[in-house]
Amino acid sequence: MPAVRRQDRDRCDLRVPVAPTECGDTRLGRMEKRVQVKICGIRSERDLRVAVDAGPDAVGFICGITHLSEDALTPAAAKDLSAKVALLTTRAVTRVLVTHLEDAEAILKLAAFVEVDAIQVHGLVDRDNLRKVYAGKDNREVLRAVHVTDESVFADVEDVVDYCDVILLDSRTPRRLGGTGRTHNWDISKKIVETQATRGKKVTLAGGLAHTNIDKAITLVQPYGVDVNTGVDDENGNKSATLCAAFVEAANPGEPVNP
């Protein structure tokens, strides 16, 4: 597809140091366990090749949207890219459907068509439809996106925690449910990780992440995984080989890239 410039993207300048209210005190040090890395917003075969070569644990295909996303794919395009993952690497790379769809039947039908390993429920989905997705997931993992706007997110997490395998903490704007390029209050995310750890629930951090701030984010929040999209894009919105590799390395320093 032709390159789409993102001049209108609601992103912060990641060259500016993260504010204290976003990163908190990071003197406690990095977690010892490996952090799972997902590169999202794959929209072309070139994007897929660049992302997979960087060595992530998962790649995300955005399909079925209700809000703005330059990375949205048709179901046929998402299915084609999903099938190509196995042709590009012998590693196990989880294929994730990221969708705004709100009806459980439609979500499950799309996941089956695209042939993915996991479903990221990223839309304004009510608890009953999330429950139905979780019940019908088969062997797929279910990630539920929760938007960290203020402390009301604690109640939002409690509403969905029983019907997902992973809670994904993201930023949002009125126009976008993800891919904002904005960080949120990581102190809130840290509290959610700590609370859910007692339940054995995995939490992934997203929103405005890049190789320049991922160490601070992981050190403070201690998430199970991290999810990046715009932070590894070039100026035209395509995945950058340099930025993808830098992000994967920064998330798990010292590990070989694309083992």
Image (cartoon, rainbow, N blue to C red):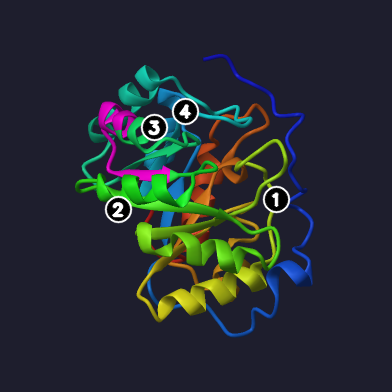
Numbered mark located on residue 38 in the image: none
Q: CA distance from mark 4 to mark 1?
A: 22 Å
Q: Amino acid at mark 1?
A: Arg
Question: Who comes first in sequence, dot 4 or dot 2?
Answer: 4
Q: Earlier in the sequence, mark 4 or mark 1?
A: 4
Check the image and report above or below for 191 versus 82: below
Q: Nearer the viewer, mark 4 or mark 1?
A: 4
- Residue drawn at point x = 61 percent, y = 63 percent: 153
Question: How many numbered badges does the structure rendering display?
Answer: 4
Which residue lies under the disc numbered 2? 259
Going from N to C along the chain, the mark reached first, 3 or 4, is: 3
Magenta span covers which residues?
109-120
CB of mark 1 within 8 Å of CB of mark 2? no
Pointer 1: what residue? Answer: 182
Rounded to the nearest angstrom, the CA distance separating label 3 from label 4 is 23 Å
Answer with left or right where residue 176 lies relative to residue 246: right
**9 in relation to 256, above or below:** above
* Type of amino acid under label 4: Gly
Q: Secondary structure at mark 4?
A: loop
